[in-house]
Amino acid sequence: MYPGKWGIECPNKAAVIHAVSGETITHGELNGRSNQLAQLMWSRGLRPGDHMAIFMENNLRYFEVVWAALRSGLYITTVNRYLTDEEAGYIITDCEAKLVVASQHLAETAQRLPELAPSCDHWLMVDGKIDGFEAYETAIADAPTTNLADEPAGATMLYSSGTTGRPKGIKRPLSGLKVHEESGPVGALQKSLWDFGEETIYLSPAPLYHSAPIGFCVAAQALGGTVVMMPKFNEVGALQAIQDYRVTHSQWVPTMFTRMLKLPATDRDGFDLSSHKVAVHAAAPCPAGIKQQMFDWWGPILNEYYAGTELNGLTHVGPEEWLANPGTVGKAVMGIIHICAEDGTELPANEPGMVYFEMPELSFSYHNDAGKTKDAQHPAHPNWSALGDVGYLNDNGFLFLTDRATFMIISGGVNIYPQEIEDAMIMHDKVADVAVVGVPDEQMGEAVKAVVQVPAGVSPNEELAAELMAYAREHIAHYKCPKSIDFLDELPRLPTGKLYKRLLKDAYWGKTGSRIV
């Protein structure tokens, strides 16, 4: 299913609504506009298997651009709108884009992109025009609104965030199906796990360039639902949108939960959330205490999954299973989980190690990086692959994540996982955000340091540091507790909620060019 179906069956139904302005694009408009861009790209020589890119803020026209690629058999790369021109230019060049659609809103960054990515032939800009770009609206104006003669299903080729180096494109083979035959793995999961369908009103509070938001939005539209797009996450705005648009489904990251929970009760409790039936969260492990508070507030509607953009496997846990196994990210619903030691030996239940998913064959590769692709594979089983997370399976087969392998702290020969400490400290009412890293220590090799962001109205000082260290000692083993605490005005997080922990760690280890902002 895709816009071609719903554009005919329910052309006046909203396909996407801007959560703040209320501006709407109908399924009929989405179908016609995406056809126009698809027709334009065909006339410019783009063919199935070619690549294009989009560099845009959360904009209603995002969806017609993505759908134009998906109904033309193209790969589309969504470029992080917060990148510098050099970073964006690198991705556009690396993904081998033949056409780029940018927006006037990002003109300051976009203006150098044609110079930085000279291999790209076609540059379009929505909502305005600058040198080097054609006006998008003018370019598609005379293109037919009818379907291409052939509509093979395209796919996304998204890039890792690059928190530990140059981002890499995550490429999966095209399905070989026609777009009307292809619901995709996300759409299939939405239907089977969370009951998405034609009546779904789906709230998307996150940046569209990220894999989960764009995947969930497009899949919801493919099923005939309506997307409510927030231009940027805002705690009160999200609750307002659920009430105003009678949202039925939503997706979140744990930092959004934390920020909403720390709102004053008067801001949290004044909204009608009765339409809200399914809240899905992922992207990072959610502290068990935070999730329990969300259950207390929203009721048993929280569903969690663990997966990567690679889609090399997926776990899921519903409300009842999580309440019976607090902290789990669920059981495998795609692939088979193996927990392995560094040498690849499989480990028994309740022993942490690298998390691998077994699939019939490796389902992805890292574009232009065979070495990184090989590094993700198990040394003895090439169809087992890992995302770099450490965890364990309990006796009942539920997966628990302990941390990223790259952020484990080794202090005096003892392995310490920062996530456990962060999960405890975030529960303190004077902690708005926290990151735990290992810092140099002459005796122990590494020492545990917590970097804390305090809420508005709280003063960071030595007394608060002592209070937080005492709080940590009450809730976790003393050897894991921070030996020191630093304060920052704001931790370096992506708008997706992902923490740039590498920036924090490198700054303490004196890596050249590192900075904490």
Image (cartoon, grey):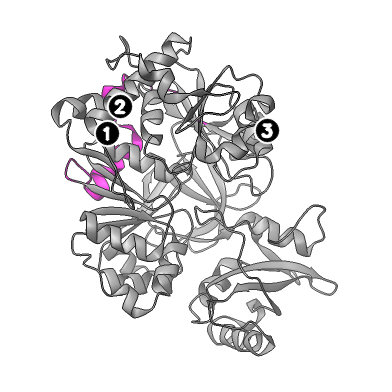
Q: Residues within 10 Å of mark 2 (few under 14, many from 20)?
A: some
Foreground pick, 45 / 280: 45
Checking the image for residue 222, the label placed there is 1
Labels 3, 2: front one: 2
Q: Is residue 22 magenta?
A: no
Labels 2, 1: front one: 1
Earlier-in-chain disc, 2 versus 1: 2
Checking the image for residue 301, the label placed there is none
Q: Is residue 20 left or right of residue 162?
A: left
Q: Residues within 10 Å of mark 1 (few under 14, many from 20)?
A: many
Query: What separation in Å lies between label 3 and label 2 (alpha carbons)?
Result: 31 Å
Checking the image for residue 182, the label placed there is 2
Q: Which residues are magenta?
A: 171-199
Earlier-in-chain disc, 3 versus 2: 2
Q: Judge whether residue 501 can be spotted in this image.
A: yes
Name the residue rendered at 51%, 57% in the picture. Answer: 497
Please tell me in which quadrant of the rendered image residue 3 appears: top left
Q: In x, y percent, where is residue 87?
A: 66, 38
Q: Which residue is mark 3?
A: 371
